[in-house]
Amino acid sequence: MPVPSPPLRRGLTLTQRLAFSLFAGALFVAIVLGFLSASRTEEQAATAAATADLELARSLSERAAPLLERGDLLRLSVLATVARDQVHGRLLVLDRAGRVVIDTALVLGDRKLGLLAGSGPFQRTLDREAASGEPPLLQRESLVPVRFGGEVIGELRLQRAVATATTTFDFAWFALVLLSCLTLVLVAAIMGHHWSSRVRRATDSLIRLTAGETGNVATDTGDLELQNLGYALREMERGITDGLHLVTDGFVGLAQQLVINLERNRLIPPGHGSRTEQLALRLADRVQMLEADREDLALACRLVDLGKAWVRPAILQKAGELTPQEVASLRQHPLRGADALAVFPPLRRVAKILRHQSERYDGAGLPDGLRGDRISLPTRILGIAAAFDLLTTCAAERPLAWQDALGELDKTRGEAFDPWLLDLFIEDVRKDPPVEEPDRPVMIVPGTGMPWEAQGEAADDRDDDEEEVTVSDELEVLIDDDEEHA
């Protein structure tokens, strides 16, 4: 017994998962670069500020040199005050001895600090104590020697508070990086969808091939890998198709030979399949049926009685009334024939036609109780053609003339048969009536009614007190009772 395959789990497709993963990665990269860019921006700003302070200190030292040499403290004080107001910092001017001459903060007046920039200008960082409860103040001090005539005559010190980092995240850089990454994600999603659609077509082709269906195998010609896969699928389809055709043609020939043997043994009406085919194809031409459906209809007509090979010969040869078990056994022959054909994928549409040959237009038929247009067009045509041939060749007492057979069919308009197809059939038969053969073989249909009768019509003729019998699906056999006891 085959193990049923587990149900498919529905979720995100491969393309969706790829796009989601790439989007998450792009967002992460953009956030990280946003933080790194903010830190880098702060570093660049601090470097630029330090360079500007050092250049300002050099410029002030050049202007302060002649003033310091002449001892013009008044102008030197004005210069220092203007510089302090400009940079919002503190300016110190030292003489040759390293003594503080000018202090814009008025704190270190006349204090000797010593010259530190004799070898050249430089910068350093100072920590100044702040008020209680506040963090220490961080200052950057630029030290530049004051030269006059090539001689160091003093030193200038410029102190400014170092600006703390105020921006921890660069949203502009984040947006730029995220936009670039999303563009790449979109391109990757489009490429992934393109590839997944091709792989999906190849997968669908494999599924159809494993199910026995052939035709329309996807063969991509754009990409080398998918092109090779398409060629492999096409070769596989060709091999499967050839094998199926060989097996199917052999089985169809065997089934037709089985029907011929049933006719020779007088178990089914001789020539019923071929006559039904001729009548059905005439009606199929009237409705302009597609060629593929026309071929399936023709084969179904030839094999219309195939399922009776699984019915006891005694039932098929019985002239009297059948028992409930025998009636149920006989009515199962469409299912038997359909099951035999459905094993082969190319014959599944023919099997569907045979399965529903006893359906009625009003939904009271067998085996599925289909109603109206839910019954396929080939099946409805087969039902009308087979019924007309049975009425003109077989009956409970004698076959009917074609005019009387058309009248019998017309009585079931809208009940057993499609009224539109029945009108076309009656019109076509009246234009070209069948030729009656005087010496044609006649066979009596077993039972009390025709196959297209409603499911409950035969049961209504029995007594109401008769016990209903349930018939098993396994009651049909291939041998007669007499042969079984022999």
Image (cartoon, helix red, strand yellow):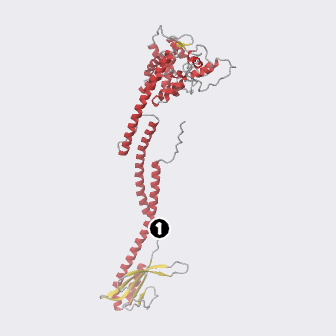
Residue extending furthest top?
438
Q: Is residue 211 above or below residue 193?
A: above
Name which residue lies at 44% across and 28% down: 248
State the image coordinates of residue 431 (x, y, percent, origin top left): 44, 14
Decide which of 137, 371 is in the foreground and name it.
371
Classify 10 Å Cα crowding around label 1: few (below 14), some (14-19), many (20 and above): some
Q: Measured from the top left, where is residue 251 in percent x and y?
A: 46, 26
Q: Nearer the viewer, residue 17 or 480?
A: 480
Q: Amino acid at mark 1?
A: Thr
- Give percent across and percent down for residue 330: 57, 21
Q: Quadrant of residue 250?
A: top left
Q: Quadrant of the C terminus?
A: top right
Which residue is at the far right?
A: 465
Q: Quadrant of the N terminus?
A: top right
Q: Residue furthest left?
A: 149
Label 1: which secondary element: loop
Across and down, in percent, residue 465 comes to: 70, 20
Q: Quadrant of residue 156?
A: bottom left
Classify residue 369 as left or right of residue 99. Answer: right
Residue 423 visible: no
| Res. 254 visible in picture | yes
Q: Which residue position holds label 1?
A: 168
Residue nearest the viewer, comparing 281 with 27: 281
